[in-house]
Image (cartoon, rainbow, N blue to C red):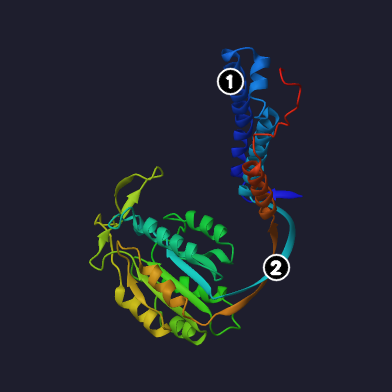
């Protein structure tokens, strides 16, 4: 069975019937031109040194060469072979804060959209590493399990919205707990957690969890999104339109502050790095650059089907046809026949 790796190129085959029409009108025009000079039969005898048959044959060679050249451009593939690819990488879990404060627009277009864009860029850079996504606010859950299917991970990422989890607040403890439970408990390396948040931790003492992460070989990188000075938490309706700011029971506007000190301690103790999100969008690039230097594990051999390219044969045949057209002359030798002195 033949398949084409570049099927769009087959649209160029429309030039073949166009070429046939072109040559049809060219030969018709030549015939009419001869008729203008005189009797057609007489003109054919006078131009008998030029073979009309060869002209038509050369035209068919050009069209045939174009046909096979277009087929070669479409990259025909015939047959298959199985290949085994050894994948090496690390397990990366990205915990994304989806609390309502991530609606804040002090980072355009919003804190959450900024985080999703950076994580999407990270996913596009991955080559062999497994990726998973944790959503957290007042609680946390594994939104996307560890996978090598980067397309599926991107779909899960796009589905994240502020308020995905009903429990309000920023519970970093739960995010780390879910991450520790999602990694392979038997391994003591090859594990990375990227924590992206904009608020202060409401989950209590983090020290026991950080100690556990350190013992289990989990490197935690942290990214802070927001302002340490604090900004109001916007309230958004179902249409995505901001209707005001969140207020407490006394009517005062509630603000959310970025606790950089806590995030720095988490990263420092586990061998990771802390970054504050900026407009340059290079925080996760720097984190991934660090990840690529880590020791990697084999994630197993992946078998896949590889089609064999056969365009070379079509290309060679096309070139031979075009070369034949170039070398084939239009003129033919005419043998002189003696018919007497006065004939």
Residue depicted at 75% across the width and 21% down the height: 340
Residue depicted at 50% across the width and 87% down the height: 215
Is label 1 in a helix, a strand or a loop? helix
Q: In this view, does 229 lie to the left or right of 2?
A: left
Q: Can residue 191 be seen in this view?
A: yes
Is label 2 in a helix, a strand or a loop? strand
> The C terminus lies in which quarter of the figure?
top right
> Which residue bears the numbered disc 1?
29
Q: Position of residue 162 (x, y in %)?
A: 41, 55
Q: In which quarter of the image is residue 287?
A: bottom left
Along the line of sight, the residue nearer the viewer: 330 or 249: 330
Q: Is 158 located above or below residue 209 in the figure?
A: above
> Which residue bears the numbered disc 2?
83
Q: Residue farthest to the front?
A: 341
Q: Residue farthest to the bottom?
A: 215
Q: Where is residue 87 in the image (x, y as percent from the top left)?
A: 61, 73
Q: Is 187 located above or below residue 258 in the figure?
A: below
Instruction: Give the number of marks.
Output: 2
**Dot 1, how many residues are within 10 Å of its Cα: few (below 14), some (14-19), or many (20+)?**
few
Dot 1 or dot 2: first in sequence order is 1
């Amino acid at each position: 069975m033949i398949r084409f790796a570049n099927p769009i190129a087959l649209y160029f085959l429309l030039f073949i019937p166009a070429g046939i029409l072109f040559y049809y009108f060219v030969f018709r025009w030549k015939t009419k031109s001869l008729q203008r000079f005189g009797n057609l039969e007489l003109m054919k005898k006078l131009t008998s040194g030029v073979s009309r048959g060869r002209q038509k044959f050369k035209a068919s060679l050009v069209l045939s060469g174009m046909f096979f050249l277009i087929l070669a451009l479409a990259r025909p593939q015939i047959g298959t072979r199985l290949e085994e690819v050894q994948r090496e990488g690390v397990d990366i879990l990205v915990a994304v804060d989806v609390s309502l404060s991530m609606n804040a627009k002090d980072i355009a277009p919003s804190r959450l959209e900024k985080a999703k864009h950076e994580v999407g860029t990270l996913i596009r850079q991955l080559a062999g590493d497994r990726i998973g996504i944790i959503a957290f606010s007042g609680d946390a859950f594994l939104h996307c399990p560890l996978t090598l299917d980067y397309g599926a991970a991107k779909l899960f990422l796009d589905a994240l919205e502020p308020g995905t989890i009903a429990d309000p607040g920023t519970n970093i403890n739960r995010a780390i707990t879910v991450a520790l439970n999602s990694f392979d408990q038997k391994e003591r390396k090859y594990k990375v957690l990227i924590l992206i948040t904009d608020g202060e931790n409401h989950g209590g003492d983090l020290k026991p969890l950080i100690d556990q992460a350190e013992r289990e070989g989990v490197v935690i990188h942290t990214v802070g999104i927001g302002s340490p000075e604090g900004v109001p938490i916007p309230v958004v309706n179902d249409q995505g339109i901001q209707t005001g700011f969140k207020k407490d029971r006394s009517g005062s506007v509630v603000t959310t502050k970025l606790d950089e000190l806590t995030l720095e301690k988490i990263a420092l103790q586990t061998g990771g790095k802390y970054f504050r999100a900026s407009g340059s969008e290079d925080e996760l690039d720097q984190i991934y650059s660090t990840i690529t230097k880590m020791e990697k594990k084999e994630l197993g051999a992946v078998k896949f089907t590889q089609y064999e390219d056969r365009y070379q044969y079509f290309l060679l045949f096309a070139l031979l046809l075009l070369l034949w057209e170039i070398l084939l002359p239009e003129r033919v030798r005419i043998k002189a026949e003696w018919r007497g002195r006065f004939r």
